[in-house]
Amino acid sequence: MASTTAWRALTSRRFLLTARPWRALAYLAGGAVTGLLALLVLLPLFVVGTVGSVVLVGIPVLVTLGLCGIPLAVFERRRLALVDGRPARSGHAPPPRPGAWAWAVFRYQEQATWRELAYALLLTTVLWPFDLAVLTTALMFPLAFLSAPYAQSFADPGDDRIQVLKLVPVSSAAQAWALVPVGLLLLPVAGYLLAVAAAARGTVARALLATRETELGVRLAQVTRSRSELVDAFEVERRRIERDLHDGAQQRLVALTMTLGLARISTGDEASALVDQAHRESRLVLDELRRLIRGVHPGVLTDRGLRAAVEDAADCSPVPVEVDLDLPGRLPPAIESTAYFVVSEALANVAKHSGAERATVRGGTAAGVLALEVRDDGRGGADPSAGTGLAGLAARVAAVDGRLSLSSPAQGPTVLRVELPCAPTDLSG
């Protein structure tokens, strides 16, 4: 485990020559600052919520405070890399349904949320004073002894005696300089003390903030369920393709065959007219097949990437669409495919259900996440359970560990947002 790695590093002979003492110093200093700032923010909110709850005004504040550990835990999990080389993994799972309310309700049902709240309370009451006390104890003595000559130089000319830390009397420059080697000897002690305190502190943080085995089991069950939902969604998509082929291209091919058969037994102008009709029908078949192939996996997505595919989908939309994508290059194929189908399905819903006059598609990559947002100025009130394809999209997004959210109040606007973990694979795009 990562916390064990931090403890084992203390026994290394080269420990003081590594960056670990400095990282421990940074971890404890950051904890002291973070805890104090959290206390200054959360304590007034708690007071306002408690007092306001008498007239029900403060209840929403207290409900929000129940989730305050989540953003704090995100930061603290990243800081754990200072202790043992890697951040902790979150114990949260993606919500099963989009929307802020569904997210909040789901988070309140997770054990990880309550452990993170406990950590927030522990940080603001116990941990940051502990960090500050360790920093003060570890650094105060060596720094005071090392700075004794400098402090002694400011002594009163008539009485050049000083008290280092109110404990060690110094009456001459020679005595002050004699304390410098003592300060140097105390520096390694301070390094080990900081590292031990940081390792203990990191063990507590990781125990409360990292993923647990029980949550991994729940996560595995959710992943299995999302895979099952994805299989169902693919089955629905297969039946749609089969239906489109039967009702569209197949019927046109039958008509084309009959027309060519009539042309074969006809002569003169009648045969020429039938050939012209067959030519028109063949073009309609080709258009139908191209449209069907574009719905399965557009060639432009494979050849030119996500930005070009989204622009092509926007050009085909009956609703004017503005596209603003900041993509550094090509992304993993599964991410590009998922992102494209989210956008294309969203634009199809805009055209069918929203009554919008304009729509926008914006997005880009940051910190290893592709974020896309589809917004329209329509009537709003979109319902994921009304057969708009959002359930299938949510399953497809969950299959690549992404998150999908929908905001669609009455009178609009409707905003569909998706976040997909990714990393650029080719910067030539």
Image (spheres, rainbow, N blue to C red):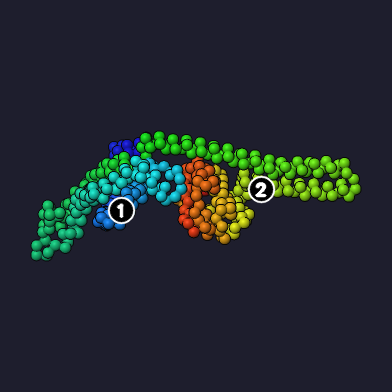
Identified by mark 1, the residue type is: Ile
Disc 1 crowd rating (10 Å Cα; few below 14, some 14-19, many 20+) is some
Name the foreground residue: 134 vs 320: 320
* Residue drawn where x is 38% and y is 37% of the image: 215
Horizontal and vertical percent for residue 408? 48, 54
Outermost residue on the right side: it is 268
Disc assigned to residue 291: 2
Quick check: 312 above or below 263? below
* Residue drawn where x is 73% and y is 48% of the image: 284
Q: CA distance from mark 2 to mark 1?
A: 53 Å
Horizontal and vertical percent for residue 295? 62, 46
Q: Give the SS element for disc 2.
A: helix
Q: Label 1, on which residue?
A: 59
Disc assigned to residue 173: none
Name the foreground residue: 308 vs 290: 290
- In the displayed structure image, the side of residue 172 where residue 316 appears, left or right: right
